[in-house]
Amino acid sequence: MTIAPSSSSIPLIDHAIPVFRPYSGEEEIQAVAEVLRSGWWGQGPKTVEFEQRFSAFVGAKYAVSLNSATAALHLALTVAGVEGGEVITTPMTFVSTNHAVLYNHATPVFADVQADTLNLDPEQVERKITPRTRAIVVVHYGGRPADIDRLTEIARAHNLILVEDAAHAAGSSYHGRPVGSISPLTCFSFHPVKNLATGDGGMITLDNPEWDARLRRLRWVGINKDTWVRSRDKDSAGYAWEYDVDEAGYKYHTNDIMSAIALVQLQRLPQTNARRREIAALYQAGLSDLGWLELPPLVPEDCVSAQHNYVVRCANRDKLADWLREHRVATGMHYTPNHLHAMYKPYVTEPLPVVEREWLRLLTLPLYPALTDGDVQYIIDVIRAYHA
Ligand SMILES: Cc1ncc(COP(=O)(O)O)c(C=O)c1O
């Protein structure tokens, strides 16, 4: 391959390689068509089926479908009862994780991350515990499971609830246990670029029946019977239209169009995640000898990463991003540490040296199931031709 020299940034053109891309086939189109023809587009039988299949997939008693992981995080922290307290959280995440703390009128307390995994550092979490701490929110960055054993130990010792933000981790497992079956509350995202993509969507998995019942009310504006259940209720003693409202819930429920896509995507997930890991291995093999480029740390043998992304590190990452863009390869940056955003400044109590150093070197390379071996080789060649 010849790589044309270039002196300036050019905008991405249509056939550039994107960073992320949803993967779907004829099955998703058929599944949506079936729902459209059925006459029941709202939350109904497809959603019930998806919840059953997803809870079985992760090995949790309950799975509560929502319209996003943002909604899932909001409601998970509500049932965890964090209002008025503090929540120890990571800065290395999409802002929804921490907005969810604020939606609950609680205070986010940022702890630093481990330099290699970019996951919350349990020792830094422990340092931040006060009598006001109610919960810990942990993100599995890129799908690589965080140190859940240690965080669970800390949570138990201090009577805190551990909430997992598994937006990147559908299909990850930790010491043989699927993510979603481990902590009291785990939140997933089905946003278009996530491993299981439905256009938008989220899920909370859990084992607690009271929380499950409350979450189902909270996602549907507080109403104590969803419309699908009421439509099946004709033979019971009550009137089908009857319901009560226990508290001011939210309009966070999903619909059967998204759930139909989700059912197909869930079936595909083992295969699409395997392809993601294959691509990561190709990057690893093609780039590991470059002294100026740091590759993501390998995942321990008894863990599985859903490999949501592939994040490399180097000095001057913007220059590398420009070089790749000039060669029609898009890149991303995940994430600006949340405590550096203007609105989170009031919550910063001390510097977080690891994340403040590392984020400046992060660059997300393209990774999605339909990326071909040829595309990956092209990206590798472009990176190898870059003069750091
Ligand atoms: C780590 C993390 N948490 C939460 C979210 C929010 O997910 P959603 O878009 O489904 O609300 C995202 C999505 O980008 C994410 O990456």
Image: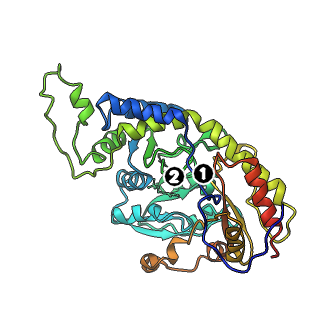
Residue at the image position 57 percent from the left and 67 percent from the top: 335
Residue at the image position 27 percent from the left and 43 percent from the top: 217
Residue at the image position 73 percent from the left and 60 percent from the top: 296
Residue pointed to by mark 1: 148
Viewport quadrant of the N terminus: bottom right
The numbered dot on residue 164 is 2
- Tag 2 near tag 1, CB within 8 Å: yes
User: Label 1 amino acid?
Assistant: Ile
10 Å neighbourhood of mark 2: few (<14), some, or many (≥20)? many
Q: In this orientation, does residue 59 appear? A: no
10 Å neighbourhood of mark 1: few (<14), some, or many (≥20)? many
In which quarter of the view is residue 172 placed? Answer: top right
In which quarter of the view is residue 291 placed? Answer: bottom right
Q: Is residue 259 above or below residue 385?
A: above
The numbered dot on residue 34 is none
- Seen from the viewer's position, the closer of residues 282 and 227 is 282
Tell us which disc is closer to us: 2 or 1. Answer: 2
Residue at the image position 30 percent from the left and 38 percent from the top: 42
- Seen from the viewer's position, the closer of residues 356 and 361 is 361
Image spot of residue 375 (x, y percent) = 73, 53
Q: Is residue 55 above or below residue 344?
A: above
User: Label 2 amino acid?
Assistant: Glu
